[in-house]
Image (cartoon, helix red, strand yellow):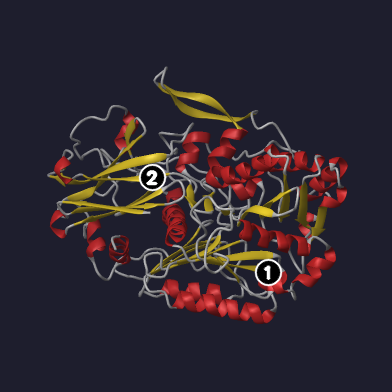
Amino acid sequence: MEVFASKKGVSLYLYKGDAMTLLAFDLAPELTPNFAGFTIRVKAQNRAFYIYNKMRFRPKIKLPKQPAKPEDVFSSEFSPIQKFRWVHVPSTRVFVENPFFGDYTYFVTPRYIVDGELQPLDKSLTVEATIDVSPFTDGDVQVGFARAFISSQAFANRFGNQLNLRPKGKDLVFDLKQEAGSAPRWNNQKKKYVDTPFTYEEIHEYLGWQARDRIMEFLDEVLQNKNLKLDVFAYDLNEPTIIDKLLKLAKQGRVRILLDDYPGHKKPTSFEMIFDKEFKSIAKNKKHLARGNFSSQAHSKVFIQRRKSNSKAIKVLTGSTNFTTNGLYINANHTLTFTNNEVAQLYADVFDATFTEAGMKAFKNSDLASKDFHFPFPPSGGSGGGGLGGGLPDMSIGFAPHPKAYVDELFERISQRIFNAESDVLFAVMKDNSDSTILSALHEQVKDDQVFTYGITDEKEDIQLYKPNSKRGIKISALKMATRLGKPFKDIIKVPGLGHSIHHKFVVVDFKGADPVVYCGSSNLAYRPEQNNGDNLLEIRDKDVVTAFAIEAIRLIDHFAWLNRLQDAEEDADEKFLRDGKEKPHWVKKYYNPKDLRCLERTLLMK
């Protein structure tokens, strides 16, 4: 979904994501002299508020009025956004406890500094537009993203800068409502910040965001309906709420699990081995837990709902999200849920074919591993009676491990799609230095300047930050970041050593083009793993789904690029301020320079 509005040379595009909105702005060139940024006001439910900035102007800049509270100086009412787009995620400040989903109206106003004074809001230049901000659902498909902002100002403001996702020890399940820590929070009654306790559940709900909600909803549907049962592909497994639900189903004999037994998962102290022992001690049928790794790893992360009466599959959840505290609360990850009989049954068929050691060994040479499965199915369309009413996106699904010939063709096809992009390439992949023509194509494309290219990985080397007066793309690292940030920022948690920050494996091509596509799922897009790992890779050719993934890439890149740029801040205690128009060249010039990536970005998002 996209919404466009324009008024007196001010333009606004709203793009719907998964419980988030991408706002893109534009100004007629004659409105750029003395331009100081955009003020963003939001109305939702019965509340109205301003988007907050991370920085403010130097005190020498005179404001049109005094902020009501000292911290309000960071509101975009007084500290305008100095870029031509913004990703807004509800519940980060206003709707923290009970996020509101529904219509959000955005009011965007360009602001100006004249003779050292920020001019009052000029409502004649305010452009407004309304869009539905809610979890992403389109027909038979739902998309869910984890927040992945444990290293952020938002998390530091809410929970401090100490990592504490679970109590010490190896307990699989623990009381999430127990106190996990405390942090200063604003107290409306006392009109000041007060040290306030918080629970593990608060942390998990905040960081897991929509991916966690989709997973818990899926499991609760099975628990609450005795006519359903569950099949599970799991690689890592230690998230306490997920494990609690799986063990309850195991007692009832309503779950089968294929759990990876790659070497790290066979150590006696691993959560996977502890779960193995616990499952077999309480399960109605001990044989409902199988361990295996195909030729290397059982790397899929999948839940399949089936009817008990006839074992027919009705719903499936897949994606990149491991069922762990890292997977949901540290990593950037996605889930895809399909309420569709044919898609669910395909995953069920793969599960049935691989739930034995012999089945895993034989799978690579089976029909299930040797071709793409195209949807909607049958070709004439329709959801097969299992949908929410809107049907399936145009898509294909493949299941690994594959024969070498299949992998060669698959990698060549995706690589050429990347090379032949017409408008944009955006990606978030965990590792981009594996043997893979797909990843090599991303390397080449990000160095080019013919299409807008934005990427993020966990690799610390070969990063490519924004360079003024160049249309060359950006590739940043989610692990190479400052954590001691200096004023006005708070110190944040350092992720390295805790696992990956980016665990996504998705590539978007031409989200603003005529033929948009996203490649996603559990596959690491590496050549040998596609021949050895149990995995699934989806190719989705649907504008709305592709847009949701494009916004996720932009959200992550915005956040981590900022931390990349602030690496030197650990030695720099000086406060950082917004630009006030005195710098040469003026910061807005790059957005109107045809040779600059920022200009390419501005015009791309206005198409």
In the rendered view, tell whether residue 436 sits above or below residue 308. below
Q: Position of residue 166 (x, y in %)?
A: 67, 38
Which quadrant does the N terminus fall into? Answer: bottom left
Tag in front: 1 or 2 = 2
| Viewer-closest of 420 and 546 | 546
Is tag 1's residue or tag 2's residue first in the polypeptide sequence?
2
| Viewer-closest of 336 and 595 | 336
Q: Position of residue 548 (x, y in %)?
A: 45, 55
Tell me how far mark 1 sits from mark 2, CA to CA: 37 Å
In the rendered view, tell whether residue 157 sits above or below residue 357. above
Q: Residue at x 84, y 67 (%)?
A: 358
Q: Residue furthest top?
A: 189
Mark 2 is on which residue type? Asp
Q: Which residue does the numbered mark 2 point to in the structure image?
A: 132
Q: Residue at x 80, y 70 (%)?
A: 361
> What kind of element bears circle 1?
strand
Q: Position of residue 503 (x, y in %)?
A: 58, 57
* Residue 270 falls left or right of residue 546: right
Q: Which residue does the numbered mark 1 point to in the structure image?
A: 400
> What kind of element bears circle 2?
strand
Mark 1 is on which residue type? Ala
